[in-house]
Image (cartoon, rainbow, N blue to C red):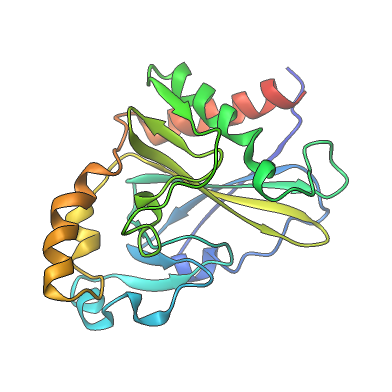
Amino acid sequence: MTRTWRVERAAASAAELVVRPHPRPAERTVSLLAVTAPALVLGSTQPDDVVDRARAAAAGLDVARRRTGGGTVLVRPGELLWAEVFVPADDRLWTADVGRAFRWLGPVWTSALHALGVDARWHDGPTLETRWSRRVCFAGVGPGEVLVGDRKVVGISQRRTRAGARFSCAALRVWDADALLAVLSLPGDERDAAAAELPTVAVGVDVKLELLEAALVTQLDDATT
């Protein structure tokens, strides 16, 4: 099979990974990223006070801010696949419609999970917000994102420049709502409601990271040749 994507790997702190530049030259690239320490990664437009910094420090979590939108993600080694998919602006996969830009990537993730025996589906519709989605990435569902049943398993956000679009993707192996909730800034009544609701919004998949990485790269090639 002809390889149509450049594959690169990086392991570093979340703070270092979120500031990585776009691929040069600008070509189809999938970056498989691994954090070397646990962290909370905020969306580009979230306020700093969404996280209780004292609680985060006590839990041993770094705090970083990515350049793409969406809510907070808890990133711990081995518990999710963090992949960034870059499409140059002159590529046939590029579209000027921000909402439709995810439509090709959702099926890729779904096919990768199907190949590993996971009954997943991608969301082909408008953003579905919840009470918590402005705080927590996995509490809402956007176009192209992937679910198992009614629970989110792959979150996708994007950043667009003249060079192209970078899709930042997180596929869960573990969904630890309690650990995330413990470091969010919430009043007591909201904390109680979140403790009841957040565990049900997402789910991890019991697959090895290396197998999921391989399945993603294979499906990218199969879907876009």
Instruction: Report the side of 200 relative to 172 (left or right).
Output: left
Image quadrant in which you'd find residue 162: bottom right
Measured as percent of width and height from the top left, residue 137 is found at: 40, 55
Identified at 46% across, 26% down, the residue is 121
Identified at 34% across, 28% down, the residue is 207
Image quadrant in which you'd find residue 25: bottom right
Measured as percent of width and height from the top left, residue 196 is found at: 13, 52
Residue 167, relative to residue 54: is it above or below? above
Measured as percent of width and height from the top left, residue 147 is found at: 40, 33
Image quadrant in which you'd find residue 171: top left
Measured as percent of width and height from the top left, residue 161 is found at: 77, 62
Residue 220, relative to residue 42: is it above or below? above
Instruction: Report the side of 49 relative to 158 (left or right).
Output: left
Residue 188, relative to residue 30: is it above or below? below
Instruction: Report the side of 30 relative to 151 (left or right).
Output: right
Identified at 21% across, 63% down, the residue is 181
**Closer-to-camera residue (171/27):** 171
